[in-house]
Structures are given as C-alpha cells and as structure tokens.
Image (spheres, rainbow, N blue to C red):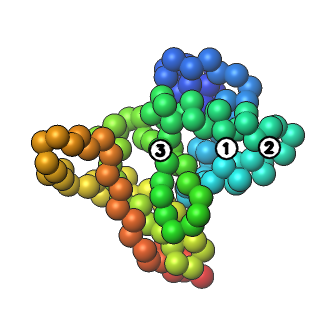
Amino acid sequence: MNSSEHILLNSKLRPTAMRILIFSFLRKHRQALTITDIESKFQKVSRSTVLRTIKTFEKKGLIHAIIDDSKYLKYALNDPNQPEHQNHLHLNCLSCNHTYCMYNYTLPQISIPPRYHVKTTQILVKGICDICQIK
C-alpha cells in the first residue's frame, strides 16, 4: 500500500484511483496549486470531479486553501503529523508567483470580540523564494 493510500485510509476516505492520483500529485509539489494546475495534470477528468475531490480533502483536513494575490484559491497539503501547524505563514514569491507554506512559522493567537470565533488565520508574506534566489 503506498503512503497516499495509507493517508486517505487514515482520514476515513475510500482510496479511489482518482483520490490517490490527485493526492499524490499534491504531495509532489512544494508550492500551493490552483484547481486549474491540478486539472491540467488530469485532462481526461472532469473539472467537477477534481473540485469534489479537493473539497473532500479540505473537509477531512488533508489540505487547506490559501488566498494570495492571484485571483484563484490555491491548495496545499496539511502536515498530518503536525496539526498545530494549521495556522502558519504563506510566502508568495514575487519572482515565480508560487505560494509556499511556511509550516514552522505559526501565527499567534488573535483576540477578537467574544461574539466572534476564529477558526483559521492567514498571513501572506511577499518575498523571493529559495529557488528564485539561487537563479
């Protein structure tokens, strides 16, 4: 059993061929990906199948959505071994425009009025990624 299949089973998801393919594709990329990025890899699969799969992964906490300066949501894997890193920084590279999760840099707890409840927090840092710096 490959590790993508194992992760899906541990998340109580049936490891269908499409789920395994999409999850494995996400695991191979350091940067966050748009639906279009994912869809272009699986051209013979309908957009609705890709969207349903991504939304299922998001509901199960396997991935998270990132809002950056692009007009599209991007998705990246959560670290199943470090649930405390769910609220972390994201770096948007001004050179390649990729967005990266900075898991080791967690966000502080934010105080808001009692009638509100914070579920997630996002901070987008703009700069140059490690790959573009060595080019």
Q: Position of residue 47 (x, y in %)?
A: 75, 41
Sequence order check, earlier mark of 1 and 2: 1
Is residue 85 in view?
Answer: no
Quadrant assignment, res 132 = bottom right
Q: Position of residue 37 (x, y in %)?
A: 70, 54
Which quadrant would the C terminus be assigned to in this image?
bottom right
Is residue 2 in view?
Answer: yes
Sequence order check, earlier mark of 1 and 3: 1
Residue pushed farthest right? 44
Count of all numbered marks drawn on residues in the image: 3
Drawn side of residue 92 relative to residue 56, left or right: left
Q: Which residue is mark 3?
A: 64
Element type at mark 1: helix
Q: Is residue 76 above or below residue 15?
A: below
Amino acid on which the number 2 mark rests in the picture: Phe
Q: Nearer the viewer, mark 1 or mark 3?
A: 3
Which quadrant would the N terminus be assigned to in this image?
top right
Q: Which mark is residue 42?
A: 2
Task: Sort mark 3 into few (<14), some (14-19) or many (20+) by Cα contacts within 10 Å.
Answer: many
Element type at mark 2: loop
Q: CA distance from mark 1 to mark 3?
A: 15 Å
Amino acid on which the number 1 mark rests in the picture: Phe
Q: Residue at x 61, y 54 (%)?
A: 33
Sequence order check, earlier mark of 2 and 3: 2
Q: Which residue is mark 1?
A: 25
Q: Position of residue 131 (x, y in %)?
A: 55, 72
Labelled pair 1, 2 in contact (Cβ < 8 Å)? yes
Task: Sort mark 2 into few (<14), some (14-19) or many (20+) by Cα contacts within 10 Å.
Answer: some
Element type at mark 3: strand
Drawn side of residue 125 relative to residue 93, left or right: left
